[in-house]
Image (spheres, rainbow, N blue to C red):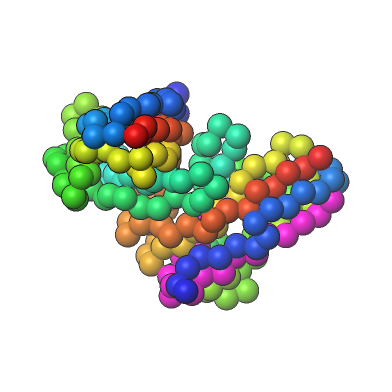
């Protein structure tokens, strides 16, 4: 299946832990993104990579670090997790930068920090 | 003030009704306007995409943009229970999409 796939789908962890979320797309897209959706359903851009190069780095804590080993993968590592990090994290990709042709989103990773 | 404003609802309508969903925005530089649909526990999926002012129709869906008023709308005709979802408007700014908060729609049989 052609898609954007994220793992894990659910992640429950304690405050202070370090965790990673992985994302892979097999659509041949050039640009990948991480979005955060809070409890009020608001989707906000965190990072964007175009051909492994970081092009968007919004105001997010330094504890969040994206890594793109190749064009098809964009992982998100989070250090020292806090309660406020609880949210659904969506990976997305688009065939060009700026998302003009629309994004394809993954199904999300629901992170709960306890 | 957020750049994109959208009434979160919830909006409940009977099957067959015409649904009107709306967003306002403040950044006059926005040129590309999109509507995404998000089912519960799923990622958003692109429904429609328009450029500049005017209407665009796709089956039961019509997207309308009025740049002079900074107002966009999505109309759903003959609404179905399967249309029950959250609808998010989105606009291009720089390299990313700016999303509204989404309107939750429930179509009851």
Q: In the picture, which quadrant includes the C terminus of chain B?
A: top left
Pick the residue in front: A114 or B68.
A114
- Residue A24 visible in the current orientation: yes
Taking the image as shown, residue A100 lies to the left or right of residue A89, namely left
Pick the residue in front: B102 or B70.
B102
Q: Position of residue A81 (x, y in %)?
A: 79, 46
Instruction: Report the magenta stretch's main SS.
Output: strand
Q: Position of residue B4 (x, y in %)?
A: 39, 32
Task: Say if the magenta span includes residue A18.
Answer: yes
Q: Position of residue A74 (x, y in %)?
A: 59, 65
Task: Say if the magenta span includes residue A54.
Answer: no
Pick the residue in front: A50 or A11.
A11
Q: Residue at x 27, y 49 (%)?
A: B48
Taking the image as shown, residue B53 lies to the left or right of residue A95, namely left
State the residue lying farthest toward the left. Answer: B54
Q: Residue at x 51, y 51 (%)?
A: B42
Give the magenta range: A17-34
Q: How many marks?
A: 0
Q: Position of residue A45 (x, y in %)?
A: 52, 47
Measured along the vertical axis of the image, is residue B47 above or below residue A55?
A: above
- Residue A55 visible in the current orientation: no
Q: Residue at x 42, y 25 (%)?
A: B9
Q: In the picture, which quadrant includes the N terminus of chain B?
A: top left
Measured along the vertical axis of the image, is residue B8 above or below residue A114?
A: above
Q: Residue at x 55, y 47 (%)?
A: B41
């Amino acid at each position: 299946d052609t898609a954007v796939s994220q793992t894990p789908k659910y992640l429950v962890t304690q405050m202070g832990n370090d965790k990673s979320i992985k994302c892979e797309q097999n659509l041949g897209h050039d640009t990948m993104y991480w979005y955060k959706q809070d409890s009020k359903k608001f989707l906000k851009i965190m990072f964007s990579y175009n051909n492994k190069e970081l092009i968007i780095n919004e105001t997010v804590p330094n504890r969040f670090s994206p890594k793109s080993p190749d064009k098809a993968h964009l992982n998100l590592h989070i250090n020292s997790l806090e309660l406020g990090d609880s949210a659904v994290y969506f990976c997305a990709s688009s065939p060009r930068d700026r998302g003009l042709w629309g994004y394809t989103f993954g199904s999300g990773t629901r992170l709960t920090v306890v | 003030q957020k750049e994109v404003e959208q009434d979160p609802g919830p909006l409940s309508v009977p099957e067959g009704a015409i649904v009107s969903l709306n967003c306002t925005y403040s950044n006059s530089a926005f040129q590309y306007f999109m509507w995404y649909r998000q089912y519960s526990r799923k990622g958003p999926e692109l429904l429609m995409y328009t450029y500049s002012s005017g209407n665009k129709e796709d089956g039961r869906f019509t997207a309308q943009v009025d740049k002079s008023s900074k107002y966009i709308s999505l109309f759903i005709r003959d609404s179905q229970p399967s249309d029950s979802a959250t609808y998010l408007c989105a606009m291009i700014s720089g390299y990313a999409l700016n999303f509204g908060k989404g309107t939750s729609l429930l179509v009851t049989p």
